[in-house]
Image: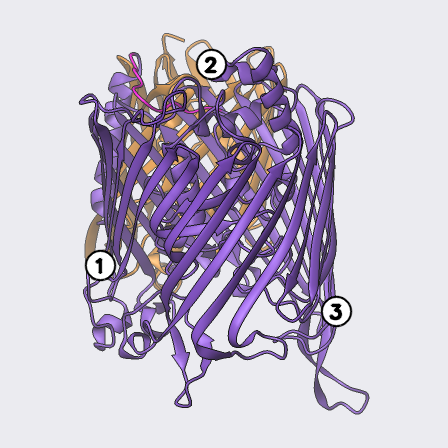
Amino acid sequence: MKGSVIVSLVVVLGVCAVDTLSAQHRGARSTAMGGASVAGSADVWAVHSNPARLAGISAIVVSAFLMPELFGLKELRTVGIGGVMPVGPVSIGVNAVQFGFELYKETNVSASVGGEIDWDIAGGLTVHVNRFSFDRYGATTTILIDCGLQATPLKDLRLGFAAKNISGTTIGSTNERLPRLFTFGTAYSPIRNFNIAVELEKDVRFPLSLKAGVEQTFFDILSLRLGTSSQPDIFSGGIGMSYSMFDFEYAGFHHPDLGWTHQIEVGIVVGR
Amino acid sequence: MARLCIVLLILAFIVSCLSAQEQEVVRDTVSIVEPDLESILENATQDAEDSELIDLLTRLEENPLDLNTATNEELQQIPGLDPITILNILERRERDPFRSIDDLFEIDGITPDIFGTVRKFVTVGSTTGFQSPFGIGSLRLRSRVQEDLQKRRGFQDGSFTGSSFKIYNRLVARSIPIDLFEGTPGTIVEIGALAEKDAGERRIGDHVAGYVDVRRLGPIEHLIVGDYVFEAASGLTFWRSLSFGKGSDVLQPFRKRGGGIKPFLSTEENLYFRGAAATVGFGPASLSIAYSQKPLHATVTPNGEISSLYTAGYFRTESELLRRNTTSERMMGARLVYAITKGIAVGTTGYRARFEHPLALSGTFAPSGRDVGATSVDLIYAEKRVSAFAEVARDDDGTVAGIAGILFRPVRGFNVVVIGRDYPFDFNSFHGNGFGESDGTRNERGVYAGLKLRATSWLMLSAYYDHFRFPWGTTLIRLPSGGHDLLTLAEVTFTRKLALHAQYKAKVKSVTESGLDEVQRSVRQVGDREQQNYRMTLMFVPSITFRWRTRFELVNVRYGISGKYEKGYLIYQDIRIIPIRRLLIDSRVCVFETDSYDSRVYEFETDVGGTFSNPALYGRGVRWYVTGRYEVMKSLDVWFRYAATIREGAKSMSSGSSEIQGDIDNRFTLQLEVQI
């Protein structure tokens, strides 16, 4: 019954809205900082936020996250795994993320390339293959292209820009376009081990969303993070630990009406 | 087409990744102080090809002035140069001729940003922009095709009689200097021709223009047969339609000085003359005379009167074609300038024009009858710290209008400008266009004050305030009205590569609104419309091959009587990159959202060579473009551009015959430029 309600919800809201919602929280660090990650430092989930960030990858990194219940609904579970590695002058990244349950499932496999395109300028491209499956109604597969840029005008200042679904992909043979998102952001480190990230994100169909987050790292081991975003209004927080070649992350965010959602992530860095 | 552009983008990115380590730039570089045409043209809210102002800038670029031989009047045409700076240039070259344009940095008044604007338009040691290897002359051809990829209603219902292509061809051929008179710079003969067709028009040469221009023929500085424009002094008697008006370059209104007669080769289809004109120099004096006999596009009533002039320039439908060449104008004009000293010049200008049919234009004090005319006297004065100008004009009916201004530079890097204007409501200057809030050079009184201060090496502050009154009712407001306009701009240069511009603009202007009176009856009332624009632009130029620009602009509009409030914003990301040798790409993605057309936002765009765009963005959507230039060989450039505006979910865009079904309005442009 609950599953049917959720499928109905997906149909009513449209696949696009659900896709936007689930795509916001890929990577615990980004989730904890209110989703402000377009100008952030390199990580596995740059594939989704801004592929230009991959240019900063200097080691092989593999990471996996689990968001067991979105707003307390077990059916809206997201699980993802990804890896990145430097290859010559560029870095490549591969992600696989699955969202949903047996009645409605969204599977996303993405491949990215990012690299320096000029002094202090990086660029990147991502190709996503998305499969939407509706139990008893069939399935459809789409291909999307994202692109991104990142600039480092000062040692402590980064600027980021990402355009998602520049291919204007629609779902199946319908005219319903998957979300087109444009993100403009900055990340600044006024003092060592303290980072501030602010960004504006615009889904062409919806109002502008503001995202902001702060991160304080202690002894290069422990990181505490706080964040907030509008559209929807969300407060978030998280903690990260780096030990040897392992990274452990936790993030949680709170929606005033829908409650808490939690996310955990484990990463392995080869050659840190 | 959108997908094709994405593929091109991807290819450009891959190529740029592979070649990032070894860039070699042939012709263009990107710079933090590159010529900022936006500050000059941002108020020209029209599409590129229709602007004759861009033609002026193109001509200046194609014919850079020699810093060692250019006259005072010629130097006044260059954006960024004011009379004090020009005087400093003239004095410097007398003492020590310029050896390169970099010597301009030694001139008081030339800052890095002004140098960035000026350097495209000046040269040292050569008077022509392009030299022929054959030694007989040179030739420049620009050919452009533009196509809207969505069908407009006019093509679907058959009201547009021609094809959907917009076609533009422009040819300029110029001889090398020919020594006809001993001891003088050589004579140059230039021939120009232009043929243009708008989308929906029938003939490839729907609009044609051309000229033969002989320069420096003994005492004859210019002899033009064909199409030309005439600009004089501050524009009260003669000026083309667009001019350097209010903008983020706050000193620009002071620099508005006419350069006399100039060949015309623009797609603007109205405000030019056709006939012959010449400028003759006699030592410190020069005399320009002009004769023109030109057809006009107008609505002529059955009783033989001109009820309205048709200035849109489109002849696509039967009703538009009915207004084509329906009457004509014969004009004779002259201008005499006498330079008393290097810094002081006086001039007088006048013209008489006769129309084939009498004018009966709407508006209480609009020009009427078959004859119009105006005369003026003007003065310009410049010395080390102060410059001033004044022009007083008188129309046929004896109404007198005037404008005067002063520029004061007490110390290097600090400029103050004040300009006063008084154009009576019944002043009729048919061919003039003086500086002001509204077009028409009439019914306006105002004071403009601006200052520009280089506070430190990293901070430039600019501001202007313009207070204006319309003492008589206008077509839209039947009562006296007015308003004021304020702009402040801070340009912060953090490093040589990183700069931030923060601009605030506020404008209050009277409008007519619907309201309720004491007994709740609906009445039209005059109230204030307040508009505020907050703009922030971040520029990062890490190398000569890349430029990054991010802009955020917020607009608020509020009406005094109804209390109606609207808002809008725009954010764009812009890059210019030279990914491989010979290829330059300009690209921008812009998201916008406004409550309606009233709170629209503008963004100045780089277009293919010789054009610009300044589209109004409103509603909710995204606009993006890619403009590229590939140098196939030294003498051949290929330009391409794809631009699209998407209003997600809209059922239609534009209106009338231009309406498009759907939520996308996209256009492709291809241009070839040959220089031989």
Label ID, residue B205: 1
Question: In front: B658, or B549?
Answer: B658
Label ID, residue B100: 2
Residue B642 placed where, x, y %?
Answer: 28, 46
Query: What amino acid is labelled 3 in the image?
Result: Pro
Q: What color was chain A assigned in the picture? A: orange
Estimate the spatial distance between the alpha carbons at disc 1 and disc 2, rounded to whole Å.
42 Å
Q: What secondary structure is marked by label 1?
A: loop
Residue B254 lies within the magenta run: no
Q: Name the image colouring.
A: by chain
Q: What secondary structure is marked by label 3?
A: loop
Q: Is residue B322 above or below residue B56?
A: below
Residue B42 placed where, x, y %?
Answer: 52, 47
Label ID, residue B234: none
Q: In the image, which residues are magenta? A: B22-31
Query: What amino acid is labelled 1 in the image?
Result: Gly
- Mark 3 and mark 1 lie on one chain; the one further toward the N terminus is 1
Residue B68 placed where, x, y %?
Answer: 49, 20
The answer to whether the residue labelled 1 contacts the one labelled 2, judged by CB atoms less than 8 Å apart, is no
What letter labels the chain drawn in purple?
Answer: B
Residue denoted by label 3: B471
Estimate the spatial distance between the alpha carbons at disc 2 and disc 3, rounded to whole Å.
51 Å
Mark 1, Cα crowd under 10 Å, few <14 / some 14-19 / many 20+, is some
Question: In front: A43, or B586?
Answer: B586
Mark 2, Cα crowd under 10 Å, few <14 / some 14-19 / many 20+, is few
Question: In front: B282, or A41?
Answer: B282
Q: What secondary structure is marked by label 2?
A: loop
Q: Chain of mark 3?
A: B
Q: Is residue A158 left or right of residue A96?
A: right
Q: Residue at x 34, y 44 (%)?
A: B625
